[in-house]
Structures are given as structure tokens and as C-alpha cells.
Image (cartoon, helix red, strand yellow):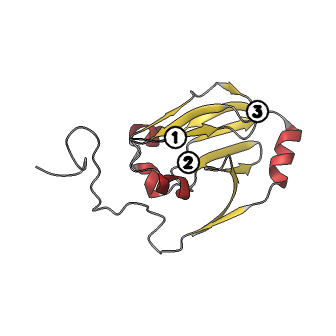
Amino acid sequence: MSAKFKEFAENLWFQIEGDIVTVGILEEALSNLEVVRSIHLSEEGESVESDQIVGDVNADEESVSIYTPCSGEIIEVNEAVLENPRLIYEDPTGESWLFRVRADDEDELASLNEEEKLEVTDTDGDDDDLLDDDDDIDYGDGDLDEDDED
């Protein structure tokens, strides 16, 4: 699988479709975090400025700040990832995007379109999963994996 993204703020990617900018975290950033425990993002409807911190991805000892690459309004937040942070490992440059912004500055959007694209490819053939289905994760509640049966 291959898709075109643009990298920004070291740990993040964005993709532009019309005036909608989708933002997510790079797989490399996730591999530097032990286990993501929580994700916090601004709410839908919030107006944001370019390079504004709009949330964070938290692990045990580290966190990654989430920025917006453009000014506009947050029109959608990926609620599935907020409710189950483990999902972010399954497809970080696809279905596990973080939020979408409707850009309101045409010049800013044109500038973002000119930035160099980063091609993300699945090099190991495992559908971009950073975690295998049998990986145990401690969610801090004493259970190793929320799918474990008693």
C-alpha cells in the first residue's frame, strides 16, 4: 500500500483534499513511544491557527504534541482512535488519522500544497500494523490486552 503524505512538525503527516487537511502521526514517531496510553485533541468546531498545538499523544514517559499545519476549523476528530488508542498502531497513515481541518486561508493552503511529499509504503507486508494481533499491551488496569479472555 502506498499513499502520498507531507511530513511536518517532525512527527506528523498531512494530506490535502480540496480545502480539507487530514492530519495524523507518523509510524516512526509511534515506534519511538513505548505504548500509547491516551490521545487528546481539540473538539470539532474549534477554530485553529497554523502551527497551533491542538492535542497530544501520550505514552508512559513521553508524549508527542499534535499541531495543525494550517489555519481553519476542526471539522472532524477520529473518535475511534480517541476511544481506543491502540488503533493508532494499526494504520497510522490511513484509517488512524487524528483530525481534519477545513482550511480558511487559500495562500496558506497553496503553500502547503507546494511542500515536498513523503511517500509512505508498507515495507514489511503486514498491512502497516505496528502491533501484531498477539502483542500484549498493558492498559494500566492490570490487564495485558483488552481482548484477553479469562
Looking at the rendered structure, the kind of residue marked 3 is Ser
For badge 2, the amino acid type reads: Trp
Q: Residue at x 84, y 40 (%)?
A: 108
The label on residue 100 is: none
The N terminus, quarter of image: bottom right
Q: Are marks 2 and 1 in contact (CB under 8 Å)?
A: yes
- Residue 100 lies, in percent from the top left, at 63, 40
Query: Disc 1 designates what residue?
Result: 78
Mark 2 residue crowding within 10 angstroms, few (<14) / some (14–19) / many (20+): many
Numbered badge on residue 97: 2
- In the rendered image, residue 96, in percent from the top left (x then y), is placed at 51, 50
10 vs 139, nearest the viewer: 10
Query: Closer to us: mark 1 or mark 3?
Result: 3
Q: Residue at x 72, y 41 (%)?
A: 69
**In the visual, does 22 lie left or right of 116?**
left
Relative to 137, say whether 106 is above or below: above
| Residue 94, visible in the rendered structure | no
Give me the C-alpha separation between circle 1 and circle 3.
Answer: 19 Å
Badge 1 local density, few (<14 within 10 Å), some, or many (20+)? some
- The residue carrying mark 3 is 71
